[in-house]
Amino acid sequence: MRIAFIAAEASPFIKVGGLGDVIGSLPPALRQLGHQPFVLIPACSSIPGLAEMMVVGEFCVPWPGSEELVRIHKAMHSGVPYYFLENGRYLSRERVYGYPDDAERFAFFSRAALESLRIMGTDLKSVPIMEGSMGAGFPDLVHVHDWHASPVLLYLKTPPYCENPAYTRIATVLTIHNLSFQGIADPDLLPKVGLALSPDNALSEFSGRINLMTGGIKSADTVGTVSPTYAREILTPEMGCGLEVALSSRRRVLFGILNGIDTEEFAPPFQSKRLLKAQLQASLGLPVREEVPLLAVVSRLSEQKGFDLFPPILDSLLAEEVQLVVLGTGDERYERLFREATEQCPAKVSANGGFNAPLAKQIYAGADLFLMPSRFEPCGLGQMIALRYGTVPVVRRTGGLADTVFEYNEESQEGNGFLFAPYQPSAFLSAIRRAFSFYKQETHWERIVSNGLTGDYSWASSAPRYIEAYQNSLRQHRYGDRFPVFMGTELILSP
Ligand code: GLC
């Protein structure tokens, strides 16, 4: 199957969050299964080595009132071609997100991605730019990610694409990585980007505003999210971010498949935990003390990640014999919280800003406990990396955390971590204290760690599920709701 991934970011080229990790690791896993994925992302000017990459095509994208020139760069990653779309007006900016015209930018990116399919997959070097290669390399399916690529699904339903058989035969899948970002814009966006008002993209529920994620949800052949639990949660008013009605209307084709991590990139070091912990403590300037539990946070410091649970418990936590290392940037108030804690208790706390991949790995490897109290968590990758590095997660029972972390049971000796459910500081603190009580019992602790280490966090089981979902999308595309039995896996929700 030829599968076009369309997304805003892809590791190792450019990564803001977990979406980038998935776009960097799922396509290679699909390739290993014998399929032909390729990836399209915007060519942000901060992508290292962009200027040296091969340019494989240049073409004009029809655009209201003008035409826009797009240049395609190409790089290989784990055998998969990654294409970078460059355009001076919209795409060649330093950051991936965060500009006032983001909705317009990503609509343009989506359209440029569709146009570039015309020249993909042929031997690009031998193709005189664009002409004559129509249809040759069209994918069987496009897999779009989050609201940024959702306009792809709206354009496909709009002329000229809906009148061109090369495009109309393409099946579509939308994956939701984070429902709280939806691509909301004023209706004057539509004429600017060549889309028309339709029940799919403008919703009375959104008081007349355009919601690009909703457009994607309503237009995709199938809609997936990144864990089975999150797929169920987003159908509820508490967790649906206002889109639960739109999502429920697609319930028949809604599925949840757990992300994997790149197990080569996150391969635990051979040294013993004892040594790695001592090295970490020393490099952070914390006292090198083996017996003190070392707690770690590696995260964006945002409300989604549950950081408002920290201020009420930090004093009680730091009153115990503990050490805490924090790596991450985000909301100023949380950065300040941990900075001040470091100033007050330098022997217990180490706060580190910025994204620092080597330090992140050193922390995953050297810490004893990994804290992830997310308010919501579509999948979460940090807890899986921690488990793989023998670091025991303490997490909130939500989304993908609930699907990967299991409470340790003293009797059966099963379970790989500690969980709490109510979003309350006291519940979080008592889960941490439960972890402490086992930390002191060596046999139990070794068991918990080894239960985590033996888990499979690779794409080995999830990549084949995507193939199943793709096959179902092809059928849905062809037969629509007449296709009787929908998804063949227990991860897929049935009506
Ligand atoms: C988003 C979600 C996170 C998920 C990631 C990759 O960043 O917040 O839970 O793991 O996407 O799907």
Image: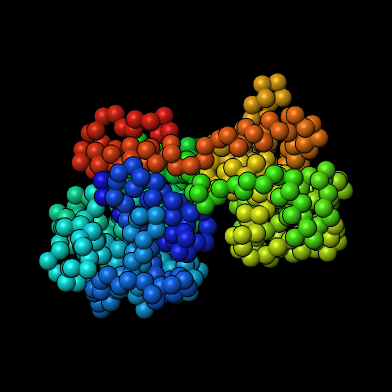
Direction top: furthest residue: 411
Residue 44 place in picture, x, y as percent: 43, 71
Residue 103 place in picture, x, y as percent: 41, 66
For residue 471, say whether it is visible.
yes
Q: Which residue is drawn at 34% across and 33% down?
A: 487
Figure quadrant of residue 43? bottom left
In this orientation, which residue lies closer to the viewer: 89 or 47?
Answer: 47
Q: Residue at x 30, y 44 (%)?
A: 34
Direction front: furthest residue: 270
Residue 451 place in picture, x, y as percent: 62, 32
Quarter of the C terminus within the rendering: top left
> What color scheme is it?
rainbow
In this orientation, which residue lies closer to the viewer: 302 or 119?
Answer: 119
Q: Residue at x 69, y 44 (%)?
A: 272
Horizontal side of 15 relative to 440 (left or right) equals left
In this orientation, which residue lies closer to the viewer: 234 or 227?
Answer: 227
For residue 383, say whether it is visible.
no
Figure quadrant of residue 426? top right
Q: Which residue is drawn at 12% across and 66% down?
A: 132
Q: In this view, does 342 lie above or below 243?
A: below
Residue 449 place in picture, x, y as percent: 67, 36
Horizontal side of 226 relative to 483 (left or right) equals right
Number of labels in the image equals 0
